[in-house]
Image (cartoon, helix red, strand yellow):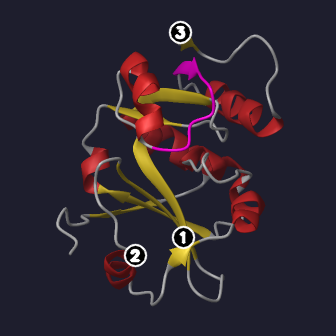
C-alpha cells in the first residue's frame, strides 16, 4: 500500500534522487512523497497522483536531429503530443525524443524518470525548459525525483519562484493544442 510521506526518507537513496531531496531542503521547498513500484506510463502514476493530490504531467526530453539543442517539455498527462507541432512552435526543425545517453548526460536520469528535477545537474544551461500553460495553472506540481520509484509534489509557486531560480533555469511557456490531427 502506498503511503504519503513528508520530506525526504530517513534512509539514503540513489545519488541522483538524494541530490534532489537535498536541493529541495536546502532551498526551503517542502514536499510530500510517495514511494512506489517502478512506473512507466501516465496510467501507472494514477495511484501516486491520488495520494499526493496532484495530476502528474508528461515530461518529454527532446532534441534536434544534430543532438545539439535539447528541450524538456512539461505538458498535461492527458494532452496529446505531436513532435511536428512543438517543433514548429519552437522554430526548430525535426525535433525527436532524445536518446537515453543524453538524458543521463544532461539530467542524470533514465527513460521513465524524466523530470525537471534533473535540472539541478544541468549547470551548462544546455536544456531549454518549456511548460504548457495548462500545467502552470495547477496549484501543486508533481514529478519524479529523478527515479521512477518515487513521486513528489510541492506548490507550483515553489517550482517557478524557488526551484528554477535556484537551479539557474528559466522557463518558456507555450500553449500546445488539444487537437493535433
Lower sequence index among marks 2 and 1: 1
Say if mark 2 contacts mark 1, CB within 8 Å. Answer: yes
Q: CA distance from mark 3 to mark 1?
A: 33 Å
Q: Which residue is mark 3?
A: 3
Percent x, y of residue 142:
45, 34
**Badge 2 density bin: few <14, some 14–19, many ≥20, Cα 10 Å:** some
The residue at 25%/50% (across/down) is 134
Instruction: Tell me, yes or no, if residue 158 can be seen here.
Output: no
Judged by its main secondary structure, the magenta piece is loop
Report the quarter where the N terminus lies: top right
Please tell me whether residue 179 is drawn above or below residue 86 in the rendered image: above
Q: Is residue 149 or residue 61 the one in the foreground?
A: 149
Q: CA distance from mark 2 to mark 1?
A: 9 Å
Which SS class for mark 3? loop
Which SS class for mark 2? helix
Residue 130: name its quadrant: bottom left
Q: Does the magenta segment cover residue 33?
A: yes
Q: Which residue is mark 1?
A: 62
Percent x, y of residue 28:
57, 25
The residue at 35%/21% (across/down) is 53
**Numbered badge on residue 83:** 2
Percent x, y of residue 117:
60, 44
Q: Does the magenta segment cover residue 105?
A: no
| Residue located farthest toward the left when viewing the structure as drawn | 179
Residue 55: name its quadrant: top left
Provide the residue span drawn in magenta. Answer: 31-41
Compared across the picture, whether 71 is left or right of 181 comes to: right
Lower sequence index among marks 3 and 1: 3
The residue at 64%/24% (across/down) is 25
Amino acid at each position: 500500500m502506498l503511503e504519503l510521506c513528508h520530506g525526504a526518507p530517513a534512509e539514503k537513496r540513489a545519488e541522483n534522487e538524494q541530490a534532489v531531496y537535498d536541493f529541495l531542503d536546502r532551498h526551503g521547498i517542502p514536499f510530500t512523497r510517495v514511494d512506489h513500484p517502478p512506473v512507466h506510463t501516465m496510467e501507472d502514476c494514477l495511484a501516486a497522483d491520488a495520494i499526493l493530490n496532484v495530476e502528474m504531467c508528461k515530461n518529454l526530453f527532446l532534441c534536434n536531429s544534430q543532438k545539439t539543442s535539447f528541450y524538456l517539455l512539461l505538458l498535461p498527462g492527458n494532452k496529446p503530443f505531436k513532435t511536428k507541432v512543438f517543433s514548429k512552435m519552437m522554430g526548430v526543425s525535426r525535433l525527436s525524443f532524445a536518446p537515453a545517453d543524453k538524458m543521463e548526460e544532461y539530467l542524470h536520469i533514465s527513460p521513465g524518470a524524466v523530470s525537471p528535477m534533473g535540472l539541478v545537474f544541468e549547470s551548462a544551461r544546455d536544456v531549454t525548459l518549456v511548460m504548457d500553460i495548462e500545467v502552470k495553472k495547477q496549484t501543486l506540481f508533481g514529478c519524479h525525483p529523478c527515479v521512477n520509484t518515487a513521486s513528489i509534489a510541492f506548490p507550483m509557486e515553489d517550482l517557478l519562484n524557488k526551484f528554477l531560480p535556484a537551479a539557474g533555469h528559466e522557463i518558456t511557456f507555450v500553449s500546445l493544442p488539444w487537437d493535433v490531427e
